[in-house]
Amino acid sequence: MNTLEHPAGFTPADRIAAIDVSEIVAISGRAAAMKRAGAPVIILGAGEPDFDTPDHIKQAACEAIMAGATKYTPLDGTPELKAAIKGKFARENGIDYALDEITVATGAKQILFNAMMASLNDGDEVIIPVPCWTSYIDIVKIAGGTPVIVETTAADGFKLTAPALEAAITPRTKWVLLNSPSNPTGAAYSEADYRPLLDLLLDHPQVWLLVDDMYEHIVYDNFRFVTPAQLEPRLKARTLTCNGVSKAYAMTGWRIGYAGGPKALIKGMAVVQSQATSCPSSVSQAASVAALNGPQDFLIDRRDSFRQRRDLVVAALNAIPGITCRRPEGAFYTYAECGGVLGKRTPEGKVLETDRDFCAWLLETAHVAVIPGAAFLASPCFRISYATSEAELTEAMARITAACATLQP
Ligand code: PMP
């Protein structure tokens, strides 16, 4: 589904011609337009916390502005922020990264972009388990790499297994890209889940590991978050540990992401960044120092409210005939299977053939926007982002339940 319309006379470069505008953005845009036109639409599409950035972080940004921190900063992060990140990795993950093994960029998205641009030659392969956040695939393509898609299933908890990884590795494999907890499934890798994958990678020295730990702080039911560089020091020299302040601290608009990894890769990433953005925002970096060094206890309260919302959504989904939803370990998404409602007829007389049909119909008739699994390369499913109020979620689940009850065999 390419919704990108190029103005007449413009021919896009080959490297972007095959890349679509994100389906999430397209659906959210359609839902927002319906809302503006007066429809009571509830949008469960956005991948950002509904909480506000905490006041002490905003305060630090205001103070930084008034103190004159309004100029270019060192290329890939201020010394203060790098020190705060070093402290975070040591404190929370037990990983010792030197300051020159740390980089800061304009969001974790740019971290991924810098890493792929710095490391991939044309045709290098990147193994990506799906369902996944599809930016991975598009970033790899823009950087000239070849995404190698490996399917995971709900039965495996939507986690990559060692046999599936082994079958995907070739002499051209450059990276394996893992995301825990995952967008879109909420699945998170425990130490036992990671161990066979890390053991396998020890036997394949040409393969590097990129882990996206963006949702680290949003895990439930005493799940113990772990990350590969902490679990397997022998892989640290070819692991890039990516993280950011967007999700944990409700700072999506501040655009700060960071990573720890081997010095040579970090330097290559800085070269890419130097010709893209020069440096991340000075003010946002000062705010991120306050986020990482400041009080962390509010994370627990926020996590508890996310958990209540998860439980509400998972219970409501599993009560709908034809829909099943695994209870995710983390993030703020559910990824439900909806094969049981496909093939059914709507009151308007349309047969729902795919998850895209199902989600489009929910938006039109129930005025609830959710994202079809097709957008994450794993169907028939749909993703709900439950980063919204319990009242809205309750109403949305009631509408989805009522809509599904009108489907005829
Ligand atoms: N990784 C994952 C898994 C995400 O879901 C997102 C945001 N949707 C990002 C990275 C990027 O986050 P940001 O650029 O805001 O740091």
Image (cartoon, rainbow, N blue to C red):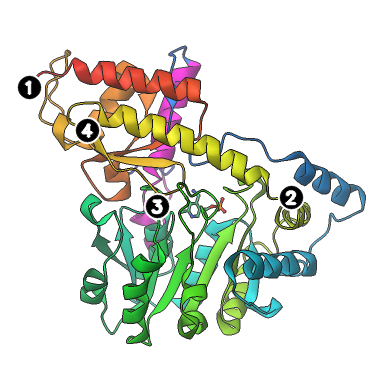
Mark 3 and ligand 1: say if the CB distance to the nearest ligand atom is below 8 Å.
Answer: yes
Closer mark to the observer between disc 2 and disc 3: 2
Distance in Å between CA atoms under marks 4 and 2: 40 Å
Residue 125, x across and y down, in percent: 33, 74
Closer mark to the observer between disc 2 and disc 1: 2
Residue at 47% from the left image edge and 47% from the top image edge: 220
Q: Are marks 3 and 1 in contact (CB under 8 Å)?
A: no
Which residue is at the front of the view, 322 or 318? 318
Decide whether the magenta segment is chiefly helix, strand or loop: helix
SS label for mark 3: loop
Q: Which residue is mark 2?
A: 295
- Mark earlier in primary sequence (3, 1): 3
SS label for mark 4: loop
- Mark earlier in primary sequence (2, 3): 3
Distance in Å between CA atoms under marks 3 and 1: 33 Å
SS label for mark 1: loop
SS label for mark 2: loop
**Magenta-drawn segment:** 8-36
Q: Which residue is mark 4?
A: 323
Residue at 41% from the left image edge and 18% from the top image edge: 395
Q: Which residue is mark 1?
A: 409
Q: Which residue is mark 3?
A: 133
